[in-house]
Amino acid sequence: MAENTEQNEAKHDNSSSPGNADQEKEMAASAYEAFSAGKYDESLKNLEALQELNKEDYKIALNKAVVEFYKSSQTTTGTLKQTLIAMKNQVHTSAEDIDGLDDVENSLLYYNQAIIHYHMRQYSEAIAIGERLYQFLEPFERFAQAVCFLLVDLYLLTFQPEKALHLLAVLDKLSVQGSNKNGKAESNSSNQRAEFTARIEAAKSKMHQYKVRAYIQMKSSKACKREIKSVMNTAGNSAPSLFLKSNFEYLRGNYRKAVKLLNSSNIAEHPGPIKTGECVRCMFWNNLGCIHFAMGKHNLGIFYFKKALQENDHTCAQLGDGSSGQSKKFTGIPMCALLANKRYELLYNCGIQLLHIGRPLAAFECLMEAVQVYHSNPRLWLRLAECCISANKGGSEQESKGLPCKKGIVQSIVGQGYHRKIVLASQSTQNTIYSEGQSAAIPVASMEFAAICLRNALLLLPDHQQQDTKTENGSKSFSQSRSTESGGENSDACSGKGQEVDKFLSAAPSSPLRKQEVENLRCSILACSAYVALALGDNLTALNHAEKLLHQTKVSGSLKFLGHLYAAEALISLDRISDAIAHLNPENVSDVSMGVLTSEQDQGSDKGDESVESSGKQTPLCYPSSVTSARAMMLFNLGSAYCLRSEYEKARKCLQQAASMVNTKEIPPEAILLGVYLELQNGNTQLALQIIKRNQLLPTAVQRVSPESRKKPVQPPSSFTQVQRK
């Protein structure tokens, strides 16, 4: 944290004069002056002498620990943490059962613990300590202001903008009262007054930046625009202010302006990560990647994310954070630089971007590394499952159980003349074991591992009543200069009330999910689970997931369509064809929308669960583009179901009706094979050959042929589902 040095100086100022004797006061003052001047050895000598005079006061030992920490260039964070824990045990206090007086007396000890928790990314512990300290603070102390700023930062990092804004409003009032009080008081030194004024101005500038970050998380455009002006007036064209303004434009959908603002920031002038704990170059490339992702330019986006990763690795190498072992022990790295490593957030971004550009195996590797840190994020487990599905689907736009393309209908031609025969492509790979000979728990991009990922995702979702669904957006981290945080949040514009805060579900490193988004995510996971179970031949499980999906109170039209198809396929495999036919009724499809909101406040979101861009410009290629094509798909499958019951006339009617509803090029190869089978059953061998030769269904009059003239029936094709859940 940038104000860490100032806060530790305040600690010395408040706690280094325990004795009443003049000698002790002089030693304490000398120790503080030496510490402020950076003469840590001299400060330690004074503190050791002071400790000889007063051995019982733990505050002297606390100051010694802090001076030794600064002497090591703030690299012994772990040691300092252990020392503070020992001191807390020594004074017989704990953060849970403290009374008011004791808390005030030991507030500096608790505050230092909160600072360490903050830099170790243990935000919940830091917030618990900070909130207790906040109750007992004097309003005009510098120390009180430091605690408030720490809490505001923690609230924003944990996506609690309402609480942060409430605290900022309190800080605003206190700063106004403090400046009025200072103006009325007679000051002996103009330097003191100037210093106080400068401190107030710096605090106001910082508060404006925090407010912008809070409003960005809440997607409150009007309030954010007003605060952006204040930031630009107080901070000028500094890197933090330009990064904030760029993030604001990014959320409004003004991507070109966001890029222009980023390029105008002079990141070379920004202090390095050792001073601020932030790698601005890394954030710059990351933000460019996020913007290009939102623009649908995924290859450019992955280029920028790779640049950000390189910059991050370079920074970590400079800080001595080259190995994971060191970073876990927190040794040899300056404390403020512990937050500089954004590797896992960047890998998360890379994985999502790679998934969009059709490189599921590379995406899987990135996300597997990220899930080691963000293992409680259900959305991330869903993304891993999508990588597995995409990797096993192959390069085809058709479902893996179907044929690769229409040209693949004919596998080969054997024989000559009268004995010439056409060999059709074999039916596909239902019940295939994708990872034969190895445990399903081994993290490889297999369908078995996808099933485990989806099970994890479902278990991580809370069990509560269904709410109105809303777009489930897998947002990517959009870093800001003050502190890297996720942009493109999924929240609506909030009214500023704090009662909704506790209803969020954490989904780090992206923003938390509201109840509506959790339910939408649940629907997406159930749809994926049904598909994976079908691919693995586990039809009962697939049927169970599909029925759960259809029973959700608010499910988008697209997922409802998939639920009916997956349930029907599972029922057919279980030889419950009558039940399957009920699911395949075209009237079940009345809507195929993705459920993506396109209001102004959602323009900045990154991506939807159905792989739709924030602007709604693109939809998956293998997804029905309209209700008509979706109903045609239902009819193709219904024809297959009728065929399995030997109701060939009904099957033929379904096939012809479906073919008349869609473009010839949109007819799936399975439908053509079904047409061939029906003509063979009807004895029309020549017509069947014509269908194969032209590679399209032929609108012909139905010819009734007696059963005696029919050829030996061939194996009917199984049900098919062209639609692939992305």
Image (cartoon, rainbow, N blue to C red):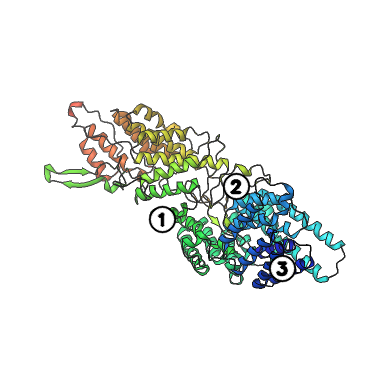
Q: Nearer the viewer, mark 1 or mark 3?
A: 3
Question: Disc 3 designates what residue?
Answer: 32
Q: Which amino acid type is shown beneath numbered disc 3? A: Tyr
Which is more toward the observer, 481 or 374?
Answer: 374
Q: Position of residue 27 (x, y in %)?
A: 73, 69
Could you tell whether 533 is left or right of 556 in the image?
Answer: left
Cα separation, mark 3 vs mark 2, equals 47 Å
Question: Disc 1 designates what residue?
Answer: 365
Which is more toward the observer, 647 or 464?
Answer: 464
Q: Which amino acid type is shown beneath numbered disc 2? A: Ser
Name above or below for residue 332 compared with residue 578.
below
Q: Which amino acid type is shown beneath numbered disc 1? A: Glu
Q: Secondary structure at mark 2?
A: loop
Q: Earlier in the sequence, mark 3 or mark 2?
A: 3
Name above or below for residue 269 compared with residue 582.
below
Instruction: Say few, some or many: other residues with alpha carbon within 10 Å of mark 2 (under 14 / 14 to 19 / 20 or more).
Output: many
